[in-house]
Image (cartoon, grey):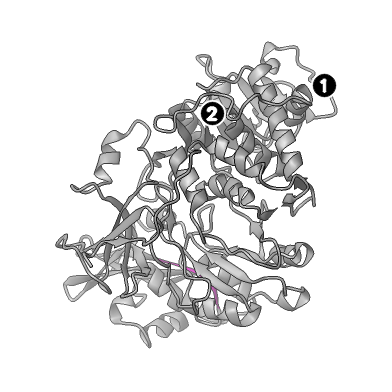
């Protein structure tokens, strides 16, 4: 073994290498009567046949009546709804680049990202339209040619009403009261459907797409270490990810029914919605999700696969609602995005009788590992072996030495699925690779003697904790996982706070959400809980702060950037 991990399987090569063509081909292999998508909030159901008709009709209208061209860039911003999901198929059928924007962002971020990405068409809802005011109403704006409101509210004038939403939006049942020419650039989802009803594109995608130069989508990274960067995602990433075998659980006796809470403004939502439907899965779409919603939907729709982030797993096993629902259909929990504490994993298995598949993916590469084998016993942190077409190495962070099995270091990858660059930032793109062309993931981990990958943290999240005029590098996730084993703690975030007279060194602080009825536990109790068990470098010398909630990213990870900013001006003794 040369200390480079490679998959023993060869990647599947397809004659179809364009996302829209691939999706259309796979949809035509499914039965038209198969229910592929259900909105958990409304119980609206969509068959494959209906999806094909809706997406074709709207795509035809956008191209032939509304003048959408291949040069356009389409922004999405809004909640997970059936209409939003259908429009994701529409852009694939047309063959145009789209830009998902996280709908919890506000006007400043939406304006910056829309301008940088060159947005010309906006697809949003009346509640989020105000976020685009700066670019729509700018005197110098000659860019935005069309706004699609997919909640079917009519535009009737200026959208501005502060952060509360659009004040001059009327229901779809009324006509626009404005005679302004601006109103001609606004259209609802249903209007597009009526314009294209009965029509079908002559070919899919409608426009010629060069998979080597045209981009499937632009996606903004989380910006956890600075300003968000716009990653350029090629068609090859989508097609090759869709073709990877064994990625998701399938069953001989029933269809895979998967809860789908991934925000459509996020990479996971934008990629996996289409991939999972084309695999013949039934998706239960959620806009907002808590454990009771998931339990109720599992009973109603016989969901057999739950996607679980580490933070949500803790809520599932501690919910007092478990016994109120028939959850016998659930078979698998697929974990990603954030680590799952080992005791939470074991409790999920014990309480729900399911199996767990953890895997490793990133915005810039999609899946890096395949997850555990279906017949493997649960081993916390086992992310499986690398996917076909991917190579992985582990490097010592201090010396740059290539490491062997069971040695922790920084993870680098080479892949046939890598992103194509950062928009307007070639220098940052080049700095993401080492001298030999390996992409630096920023993750820390190791692989075992069976070439299974395990993550141990993020390089950028490591906290330098001062110990006797020296320091140790501590991953906050390790301390958080330990704290979550305390019976009184519901959620936690650990951050490093600067130490007086020791530049660059920190002490740890925990922000803690107590479980209901556990208000008697004190900060001293929690500090003692850690100091009785963990090494001195992990003690909470910067204290414990009780809070009502933990700030998280849109996909449920602890928002490390928020907590670093929160304590950035603090110094402790």
Looking at the image, which is closer to me, 57 or 388?
388
Quadrant of the image occupied by residue 407: bottom left
- Which residue is under mark 2? 96
Quadrant of the image occupied by residue 383: bottom left
Q: Give the quadrant of the C terminus.
A: bottom left
- Per the rendering, the mark at residue 273 is none
- Per the rendering, the mark at residue 175 is 1
Going by the picture, which residue comes out furthest to the bottom? 532
Q: Is residue 346 above or below residue 32?
A: below
- Residues drawn in magenta: 489-494
Q: Give the residue displayed 37% in from the left and 86% down from the top.
A: 533
- Give the prevailing secondary structure in the magenta stretch: strand
**Mark 2 surroundings: few (<14), some (14-19) or many (≥20) residues within 10 A:** many
Does the magenta segment cover residue 384? Answer: no
In percent of width and height, residue 30 lies at 69, 47
In percent of width and height, residue 149 lies at 69, 31
Q: Is residue 194 visible?
A: yes
């Amino acid at each position: 073994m040369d200390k480079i991990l490679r998959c023993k399987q060869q990647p599947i090569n397809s004659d179809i290498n364009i996302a829209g063509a691939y999706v259309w081909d796979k949809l035509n292999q499914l039965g038209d009567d198969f229910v592929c998508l259900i909105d958990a909030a409304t119980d609206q159901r969509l068959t494959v046949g209906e999806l094909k008709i809706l997406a074709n009709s709207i795509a035809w209208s956008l191209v032939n009546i509304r003048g959408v061209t291949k040069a356009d860039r389409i922004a999405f911003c809004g909640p997970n709804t059936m209409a939003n999901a259908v429009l994701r198929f529409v852009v694939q059928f047309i063959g145009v680049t789209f830009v998902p924007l996280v709908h919890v962002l506000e006007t400043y971020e939406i304006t910056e990202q829309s301008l940088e990405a060159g947005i010309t068409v906006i697809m949003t809802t009346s509640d989020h339209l105000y976020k685009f005011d700066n670019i729509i109403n700018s005197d110098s704006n000659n860019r935005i040619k069309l706004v699609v409101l997919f909640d079917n509210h009519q535009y009737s004038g200026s959208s501005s009403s502060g952060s509360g939403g659009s004040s001059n939006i009327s229901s779809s049942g009324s006509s626009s009261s404005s005679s302004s020419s601006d109103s001609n650039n606004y259209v609802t989802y249903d209007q597009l459907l009526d314009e294209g009803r009965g029509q079908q594109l002559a070919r899919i995608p409608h426009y010629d797409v060069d998979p080597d130069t045209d981009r499937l989508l632009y996606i903004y990274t989380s910006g956890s270490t600075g300003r968000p960067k716009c990653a350029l995602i090629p068609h090859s990433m989508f097609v090759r990810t869709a073709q990877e075998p064994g990625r998701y659980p399938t069953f001989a006796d029933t269809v895979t029914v998967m809860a789908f809470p991934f925000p459509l403004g996020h990479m996971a939502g934008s990629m996996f919605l289409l991939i999972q439907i084309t695999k013949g899965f039934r998706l239960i779409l959620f806009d907002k999700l808590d454990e009771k919603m998931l339990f109720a939907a599992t009973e109603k729709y016989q969901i057999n696969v739950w996607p679980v982030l580490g933070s949500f797993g803790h809520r599932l096993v501690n919910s007092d609602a478990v016994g109120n629902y028939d959850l016998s259909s659930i078979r698998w929990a697929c974990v990603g995005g954030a680590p799952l504490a080992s005791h939470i994993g074991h409790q999920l298995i014990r309480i729900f009788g399911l199996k767990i598949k953890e895997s490793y993916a990133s915005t810039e590469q999609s899946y890096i590992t395949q997850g555990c084998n279906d017949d493997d016993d649960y081993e916390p942190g086992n992310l499986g072996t690398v996917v076909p077409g991917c190579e992985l190495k582990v490097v010592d962070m201090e010396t740059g030495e290539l490491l062997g099995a069971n040695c922790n270091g920084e993870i680098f990858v080479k892949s046939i699925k890598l992103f194509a660059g950062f928009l307007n930032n070639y220098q940052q793109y080049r700095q993401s690779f080492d001298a030999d062309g390996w992409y630096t993931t920023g993750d820390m981990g190791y692989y075992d003697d069976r070439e299974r990958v395990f993550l141990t943290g993020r390089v950028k999240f490591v906290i330098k904790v001062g110990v006797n005029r020296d320091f140790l590098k501590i991953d906050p996730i390790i301390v958080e996982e330990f704290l979550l084993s305390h019976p009184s703690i519901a959620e936690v975030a650990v951050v490093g706070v600067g130490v007086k007279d020791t530049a660059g060194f920190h002490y740890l602080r925990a922000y803690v959400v107590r479980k209901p009825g556990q208000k008697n536990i004190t900060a001293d109790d929690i500090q003692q809980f850690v100091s009785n068990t963990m090494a001195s470098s992990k003690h909470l010398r910067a204290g414990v702060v009780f809070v009502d909630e933990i700030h998280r990213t849109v996909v449920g990870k602890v928002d490390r950037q928020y907590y670093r900013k929160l304590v950035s001006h603090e110094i402790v003794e």
